[in-house]
Amino acid sequence: MDFLKDIVKEIGDDYTKLASDISDSQSFIDTGSLVFNGLVSGSIFGGVCSNKITAIAGESSTGKTFFALAVAKNFLDANPDAYVLYFDTESSITKSLLESRGIDLERIVVVNVVTIEEFRSKALKAVDIYLKTPTEDRKPCMFVLDSLGMLSTEKEITDVLNDKQVRDMTKSQLVKGAFRMLTLKLGQANIPLIVTNHTYDVIGSYVPTKEMGGGSGLKYAASTIIYLSKKKEKDQKEVVGNLIKAKTAKSRLSKENKEVTIRLYFDERGLDRYYGLLELGEIGGLWKNVAGRYEINGKKVYAKEIYKNPDQYFTKEVMQALDEIANQQFSYGKGL
């Protein structure tokens, strides 16, 4: 034991510890959707991990940017002194968009990046500055990269300028290298990174399969990978948001290949906090759905009415029961 302590002392940094001294506490960032929290952490009161990489992947117009902004807004709302660094590769983030999402403009920095090398350099500089700040002065911070699929490389840009129609075969290696450097540093700084990415259909697959672009770098680095698919939700004739099916393609915190449906509004409401809990309760036998109505507290009520007055139906006792169901449904080693 003394030998091991001597090694720890000789290496002499803040991140080398005996396993017995490692903190087992895991902190999470509430995403704003209780059922999505359950999907990614096994608890409706959890969320995305506070010091790891979470990838949100989907086809075009599945709401990836809106989803990332909704999580960022919830993070800022929950931490009054927090801030967000938003790496924008699509030039999609505008002042009016952020205002429409209800995000405090004084606490988000939008960083436009074009290449993987540029993102890697700026992200590493930001983390280094954060780590040099005295621990007691550090404020909660979140990084968002939107999106990985739109990042180019310096070689690719040079080839285009020189009229060379050659595919850059180094791109996946650059992505892998960037996340190799960032993953540990983000963990040390306790900074979560949300990465949006594109998916494509796998050609020749016997079963229709979606795959995430960008090579294997993000797949290895991310603790959680969520695939999104959607359908438009209309209020009368106007499209007001998306009903999004979220599926865990990879998770170190919860079971893989689990699905939930969440509601995402295109205004300041963002992610619907309670949507999906009725289906979760039904799976766990907490109530039954009979002809579109749920029997709660001895009353048969339509879902629309329940979601309209959530505090009336989702009481403290009901929420505790739903959390136990989420734990059984989504956590490793448990099942309904």
Image (cartoon, rainbow, N blue to C red):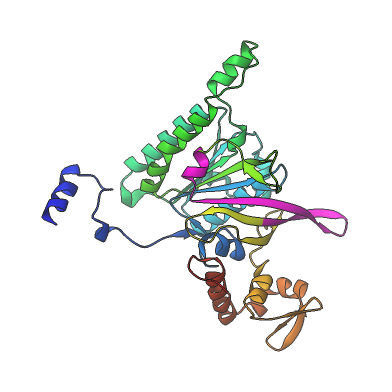
Q: Quadrant of residue 261?
A: bottom right
Q: Position of residue 113 (x, y in %)?
A: 55, 30
The answer to which of 94 and 279 lies nearer the viewer is 279
Q: Position of residue 48 (x, y in %)?
A: 51, 56
**Could you tell me which quadrant the N terminus lies in?**
bottom left
Residue displayed at 57% across by 28% down = 114
Q: Is residue 150 above or below residue 265?
A: above
> Which residue: 38% across, 43% down?
184
Q: Main secondary structure of the magenta part?
A: strand
Relative horizontal placement of residue 276, taking residue 115 as reference (left or right): right
How many numbered circles are shown?
A: 0
Stretch in magenta: 217-245
Taking 244 as reference, is 106 above or below it? above
The answer to whether residue 126 of the structure is visible from this angle is no
Given residues 48 and 241, the one toward you in this image is: 48
Q: From the viewer's perspective, is residue 145 above or below residue 263?
A: above
In this view, which residue lies farthest toward the top?
Answer: 162
* View extreme (bottom): residue: 298
| Residue 237 among those drawn in magenta | yes
Q: Give percent across and percent down for residue 295.
A: 72, 83
Q: Residue at 51% x, 59% y: name it.
A: 78
Residue 233 position within the rendered picture, expressed as x and y whole percent measured from the top left = 79, 57
Name the foreground residue: 214 vs 267: 214
